[in-house]
Structure formats: structure tokens, C-alpha cells
Image (cartoon, rainbow, N blue to C red):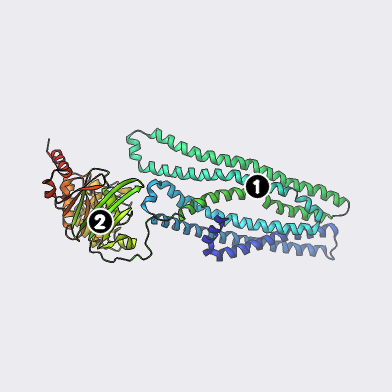
Amino acid sequence: MKLLWQLGKEAGRYKGLYVIAVLSTFALTLVNLAAPKVLSAMTAVVEQGGAADPVREIGRLTILLVGLYLLRVLFRFLSNYLAHKAAWNLVEEMRRRVYSHIQSLSMSFFHDKQTGDLMSRVVNDTANFELLYAHLIPEMITNVVTVVGVTVVLLSINVQLTLLTCIPIPFILLGGWIFSTKVRPNFKISQRALADLNAKLQDNFSGIHEIQAFDQEDYENGQIHARTRVFTKAMLHALKLSAVFHPCVEFLSSVGTVIVVGVGGLLALQAQLSVSDIVAFLLYLSLFYTPVSGLARLMEDAQNTFAGAERVMEILQTQPEIHDEPQAQEISSAQGAIAFEHVDFSYQEGSAVLQDISFSCRPGQMVALVGPTGVGKTTLTQLIPRFYDPTRGRVLLDGKDVRTLTLKSLRAQIAPVLQDTFLFNGTIADNIRYACPEAGDQQVQEAARAARIHDDIMAMPNQYQTQVGERGLRLSGGQKQRIAIARAILRQAPVIILDEATASVDMETERRIQQAIGELAGKRTIVAIAHRLSTIRNADLILVLQQGRIVQRGTHQELLRQEGLYRRLYDAQSKEDVPA
């Protein structure tokens, strides 16, 4: 009931459409209840011939019956179309909301989530709202009104026979309750299995190159088969329960018809019931048992719907760990001064990633982070735009704790260039312009020139309209990184974060990237993670991290004069760069 209440609030904005659809459903039910009465009256005229002009009376009743059937067409159209219109609008709204909410969640939320599972929640699970609001609720309303209306009519015909026909009802309802409790867990399993299958498919399609390169097609076929088997097994078990329940309901419904025929026939022989009343009883009885026998299907659909709805609500009820503080202020144009004051951070309690990190840099300076893999360099940079918050200490931008600034305005001051460069499936121009959608072609090209990628782009057949492919597969690693730098330059942010901007590129590409970074030096505050120490020779401050702590700091020349980790890293790389 709590879930139904939550769903009802979500659908409230479309209540106008639902009101008309529900009223049409009521009207449709009344038409369905009136039609057997007209047929019974026609039977009475034929049986008894009591009307002064039987032919004229039958003609009048025929016209009335045609009118009722035409009204049924109208009301069924209004009921079905408006309910579907409201339901699909709700699905559209829910998909937007779920996606928007997922976007707002903190990075920690995504640590143990698979992309395919989140896609399933946005696309598949939200589609169940259409089943609920366009089918289940209208049919339940129709069924309840029909059962109540038919019961009243049957009682008016013959109380004794009506009570006898109700004998199967408790057994049908009990069976429906047992069925729903047994089938719901299977639908939950099938929903999870479908999401797991989507997640695995997404992973496999993204990693198709690795699958083929390592000859793992057979293994991955087995993985997909195992997941599809879980889904199929859960669905087949639910369908087996349905295959048992549906015929039982049909049998119990048939028992009611047998009672009417048997007992009604005896009453007719005893002149206690007319043939026309028996005909009316049988016609109404089909209306009476149709919604009751359809209860199983409705319950089955309801369990499937609620299983998906619970997964949607689970997402919507998840709150982001990183959010705007109540008194958060906007920062419109930062100078770019950055400071860390005794910052500690850990992803999990008891496992420190950063310990007592303190440093500062003035606007326009370049700070480089150096150290072995896994010492917290990337984590440190992610504290600046508040993808995570420190467990202790403060991160300052222009002297203000970043937690006192709104996330939107804070992140607008920062342009990242990540080691794992992500390009969207579109044109080169679209990917550069992503940082500033309103930028013109001239601005895009100026940013590309500054990133030393313009000449490469102009050499391509479609130049700036060249399609990059999914994740930029049609470009080299160096080209993707320079496009990412152009994107960061176009943003005109006072702070630029470079995470291994020259990783895995050749010497010529590294030289071009160094030139691009050199042009930014002095104009923007740069925080750079560097694997190749040659790219940070001119940094104003180099921080050497080891085991989550700053163990050395200074300029390139100052650190070379010291015995320590930086000198050892530099010597090792110098040997690697010596031609064989």
C-alpha cells in the first residue's frame, strides 16, 4: 500500500486524463450492464408476446441495443486511449526523473553498480508504470464496478440463485492470494536477472575487442547463457503457477454456470423463474465471472509491475552523499587559488587513501602530483570539484571551503582532462563544444589550435564534422587526449585538472601536449598528475606522494638536488629514455 501511495503521487499530475478515463470506464460498465437487460426484455417479448405491437417493440429494443453498442465503442476509446496517454506520459516523466536522479548521485554510488543494471531501471522497470496505469487500475475499477452492478441486478432477479452462484467466489479469491504470494518472488528474480543480463551485455559489447583478442567467445557465451537461464527459469516457474491457477479459476467459474443452469432449470419447471430471467441470469453471469476469472492475470501483472516499481523507487529514494549545504553560495568567477588544509580521505572506514595533505597554490600556478600508482593522486584531484568530501580537513578555492559553495557553480570553475579520455559518439566539433554548447565554430577551432589538434582535424576527410565513433574509437589515443584538452580550454575555467594527460602517447604527441599545457601555464591554475616527469619540469610546485602522504615538495630542480623518491623516479625514466 505504501508503494501504491507513492506511485499514486507520481501519477497525480495527469489526474485530468485519469478522471476522464475513469468516468468513461464507469460509463462503459453501465452500458455493459444495460445490454443484457435489453436482450432479456427482447426475449420476454418473444416468449410472452405481451406487448401490444411485438414487432415495433422488438425494433425499438434493437435500436436501443445498437445505440448502447455505439456508446460502448465511444467509452472504450476514451477509457483506453486516455489511460494510455496518461500512462505513457508518466513513463516518459519517470524515465527523465530516474535518469536525472542517477546523474545527481555521488560517485560512491557508482562504485558497485553496473551500467546495464542502471539502464534496465531507466528503460525496462519504468515501462511497468504503463501496465499499472493503463491496464491494471482501469481493469480493476471496471471489474469492481461490474461485479457490484451485476450482483445487484442478479439479486433483483432471484436472491436464492444469486447466493448459490457466489459459492465459488471465496475459493477463487483464496487461490488468487496464494498465487500472488508464490509468483511475486519469481518476478523479482526475473527483474534482477534481466538487469544482470543487460549489465553483462553492456560490458561485453564495450569489451568486444578484448573478448576476441583473448579468444574468450565461448566463455562469454556461457556467461550470457547462465544469465538468460536464470531469467527463463524464474519466468517458467511463474508461468507454471499460472498454468495451474488459471484452469482452476475457469473450473470454479464454470461451476457457477452449472449451478445457474441446474437450479435455474428446476425453478423454471416449478414456474418460479421465467425463461427470460434465466437468459438474463446467464448473460449477467458471464459479466460476473469474467472479472473474477481475470483476477489471476491481474495479480500476475501486478506482481510484475510492483517488482519493477520497487526497483525504480529504490533509485529515487537513494540520496546523494555529496549535495549542496543549506547555506551554500554560488561562486561566479573564481581566481583559481587552491589550498588543502590537513586533508584526510578514505573510501572505506579504516582504510586511509590520503593522510594529512596540506599545500597551496596561487592563481595561475601549476601544481604537479607525482608518485607510484595507487597513492591517491587522482583521489586528491577529485576532492577539488567535490566528487568526494574529505573525512578530515578542508579544501579551499579562493579561500572558501568548497563545501560552502554550490556544486554547480563550483564545478563550473574546473575543467578536467582525464587519463581515460571519454568522447561521445558524435562529431569532433560536438565533443569539443560539449564544454560550452553555445560556443561558435571559431571558438571551437581556436581551442583546437591551442590544444595542438587543429592540424590533425583539418587533415581528416570531414574535418570538424568527422564522426569519432563510440568512445572515440576512430581516433588515436593522442588525438583523443588533445581533443579533451581543447574541450577543457574551451570551457574557460580558471582551474584545469590534468590526469596523466600524456599517458601512453608517442614522443611527438607528448611534445604537442606539452606545448598546449605550456600555453595554459600562467593563465589558468593547473593541477596535473604526471607519470612522465618531463611534462612537469616547469611546474611551480611538485608534490611527491607515497602511501597517501606528501613525502617531498618543491620545484623540479629543487627535488633533483634531494635524495628521495623523485630523484629515483627521474633517474629510472632517464635510463628508459636512453636509446638502445
Q: Position of residue 85 (x, y in %)?
A: 53, 60
Camera sees residue 252: yes
- Of the residues tagged 2 and 1, which is closer to the observer? 2
Nearer-the-camera pick, 323 or 224: 323
Image quadrant containing the N terminus: bottom right
Q: Residue at x 51, y 60 (%)?
A: 10
* The label number, if any, that marks residue 340 in the structure image: 2
Q: Is residue 72 above or below residue 169?
A: below
Camera sees residue 418: no
Q: Is residue 557 above or below residue 524?
A: above
User: Would you name the residue on which mark 1 appears?
Assistant: 176
For the residues labelled 2 and 1, say whether their Cβ atoms are less than 8 Å apart: no
Left/right of residue 28 with respect to residue 513 in the rendered view: right
Give the mark, 2 or 1, whose residue is nearer the N terminus: 1
Q: Position of residue 140 (x, y in %)?
A: 63, 56
Q: Secondary structure at mark 1?
A: helix
Q: Position of residue 173 (x, y in %)?
A: 68, 49
Image quadrant containing the C terminus: top left
**Mark 2: amino acid:** Phe
**Mark 1: amino acid:** Gly
Left/right of residue 182 with respect to residue 513 in the rendered view: right
Q: Residue at x 25, y 56 (%)?
A: 340
Left/right of residue 381 with respect to residue 108 in the rendered view: left
Q: Secondary structure at mark 2?
A: strand
Quarter of the figure with residue 83: bottom right
* The label number, if any, that marks residue 479 in the structure image: none
Crowd around label 1: few <14 · some 14–19 · many ≥20 (10 Å): many
